[in-house]
Image (cartoon, helix red, strand yellow):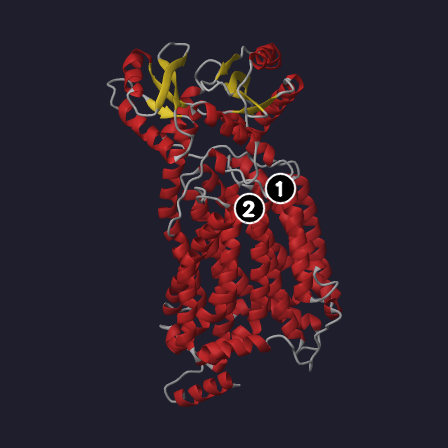
Amino acid sequence: MADSLVRSRFSDMLTSRRGAWVAIGVVLVVLVALFGLFGGAEASQRTARAPVDSESHQVGELLATFPDADVQSVLVVASRADSESLTEANVDSLESLVPALNSSTGSESNGPLVSEDGAAAVIVVPITVGEDGTRTAQVVEELRADVAAAAPGDLVLQVTGGPVFGADVASAFEGADVTLLLVTIAIVAVLLIVTYRSPILWLVPLVVVALADGLAGRLTAAAGSTWGLEFDAGIISVLVFGAGTNYALLLISRYREELLSAEDHRLALSRAWRKTVPAILASNVTVVLALLTLILAAIPMTRGLGIPAAMGLLVALAAVLFGLPPLLAVFARKIFWPFIPRPGVTPRQGRAWRAVASHVVRRPGTSLLSALALLAVMATGLFGTSVGLDQLEKFRVQSESATGLEVLSEHFPPGEAQPIVVVTDSESIDDVLTAINGVEGVVRAHPARTTEDGTLTNIMVTSAYVPSTEQSTNQVEQLREVVHGVPDADALVGGAVAEDLDARVGNELDLVLIAPLVLAVSFLVLLLLLRSVVAPVLLLVVNLASAVAAIGAGAFLSRVLFDQPALDLQVPLLAFLFLVALGIDYTIFLVHRARAEADKLGTRAGMVEAVTHTGSVITSAGIVLAAVFAALGVLPLVTLSQLGLIVGLGVLVDTLIVRTVIVPAIFSLAGDRIWWPGRLRLRSSSGESAHESRELTAVAD
């Protein structure tokens, strides 16, 4: 009671004539202060893909102790445009290119080395890499410019190799976050206009959420820089826009409903705020806690996403709860023009949803089996799904490094582009080389560099397999087995291919650890919100089934429509987390209302009433969130486009199938037992028959 009284006084103050202007002023001061304080923050660069305790990470740290550790080799791959063999004149022109490359890099290049079939050649060019992918990208672009300026006209030259892949990823994201932001804003704007059917109303929540996204971007960048977190800013932006818009839709929908019974728009807004805050808070807490479980992940990119994403959602929550209501109070009822809700006006929305919910409640068994059959069909997409993409498959759009690797693989051992690295005790070098050369698929292995004290030697191993393929990662496992068996060598196997292998293992461990924690968090929030054990268990099982179905369908569509042979390593875990946590959002929106209505009408009729009033807003929120995640497809990496496809599809399934059919059917079948061990307020042993009569009458109506 005291909590309700505090909420009532606060909401009345927040929406009052004077309080609204004071709240707007406070929000503006806070925004200006925080934007000024964190305006110069920059997000951390994406780098590490494997766990920090992995063997490949240890090799990376050891390599940093070698002389000229910042010097790495890239490859200039040459071929004829007509795919014919290189002529002597072509080779001579490549030899004349070497001095220009030496002058550009300040290092001695090696080559050209002509392939056995004579159709391609490669020049090995040492470059000084930058501290991160962005700086390395600048070095690579300068090299490419020099190559283009001195390139013979009858040859096609491409710069590729290990450092170039990372540089191309960094370059691909230049301007991509801005593009994602503009596409996201456009999507949200269009969908809000369609939802509200007002030329004015859509601007208010859009401005509030856009400011929240801008502030969240600066705060998360500062957090990433301070704590050394690695994360994708695009995902944070999508979460803020998606969740913030959903909260705004729920609040404004309830505000519109209250305006139909209240003459004073401020009173209506205050009531709407009080009645939606529990659901919005529960929704936000669920996703925030689920995201915070990522701090336990082994993969740096996964672990780094947790805290910034949680911060972004908290900013979105604060913006909608404290920034949106005062603006709505100032604009008053006329903001809904031309369809202004007034007391006595019969609402047009909800009739179709009432009809659907009534049909499901009357035939719950048939409805439930039909919906579950659809989820089962979607889940069959998991059959034949593999996880892990090689270097050529990770770009959604073609890159020069990937094209160069394709040419290299056709005419040279594919492992030339990304050699496997072995670091060993120098005294055991001969034994380690013997062990390495005994592994199938090793083209050659040779010592490259030694530490200044002579204790460690770096061995470069060229593989016959395309980097990051199954053959390649299996070869890394074999190499580790044989070099670990060399006495006193303390040999470790690393490099980009080994990092991919370690990333695969780390992502599998993260999925096994994080997925149960996400389910546990969701269960606890539902338990506290609904004061029931049965309902949270059933709802969580349904949500889990929906998530699995969405991942299966998304994997199938990725293979069939986009020719993507596998899911990227991070996609299963992140997709599962977002699908479960965000899916629980819509469960909370619906079931929180159903609980309140059940106390008046009974469980079955209360569910019909809940679907009637929330069907439109949940559908709108789901479409907005699905479209916002789909916007990730504008980014160049397959990882993000797959994540956007799966989560977008899953949100639509949650909205249109789970919340509309499956949940009402389950509640109808379970009846009041769904609230066990709690009880409905109106229910008593003496009044059970009257209660059932009222419930059946309400459903029939």
Instruction: Give how far apart the Cα atoms at labels 1 and 2 are.
Output: 10 Å
Circle 1/circle 2 CB separation < 8 Å: no
Q: Which residue is pictured at 50% across the width and 85% down the height?
A: 700
Q: Is residue 616 left or right of residue 294?
A: right
- Assign a secondary structure to mark 2: helix
Q: Which residue is mark 2?
A: 235
Please, is residue 54 above or below residue 119 in the view?
below
Q: Position of residue 35 (x, y in %)?
A: 67, 43
Q: Amino acid at mark 2?
A: Ile
Front one among 638 and 307: 638
Q: Amino acid at mark 1?
A: Asp
Q: Position of residue 637 (x, y in %)?
A: 54, 40
Q: Position of residue 590 (x, y in %)?
A: 51, 68
**Residue 84 in view of the camera:** yes
Q: Which residue is pictured at 38% across the width and 66% down the height?
A: 538
Front one among 118 and 246: 118
Task: Count the numbered circles shown.
Answer: 2
Q: Is residue 10 left or right of residue 529?
A: right
Task: Kindly identify which numbered label has been placed on residue 177.
Answer: 1
Q: Which residue is pictured at 73% across the width and 68% down the height?
A: 332
Q: Is residue 667 left or right of residue 620?
A: left
- Assign a secondary structure to mark 1: helix
Please, is residue 542 above or below residue 169 in the view?
below
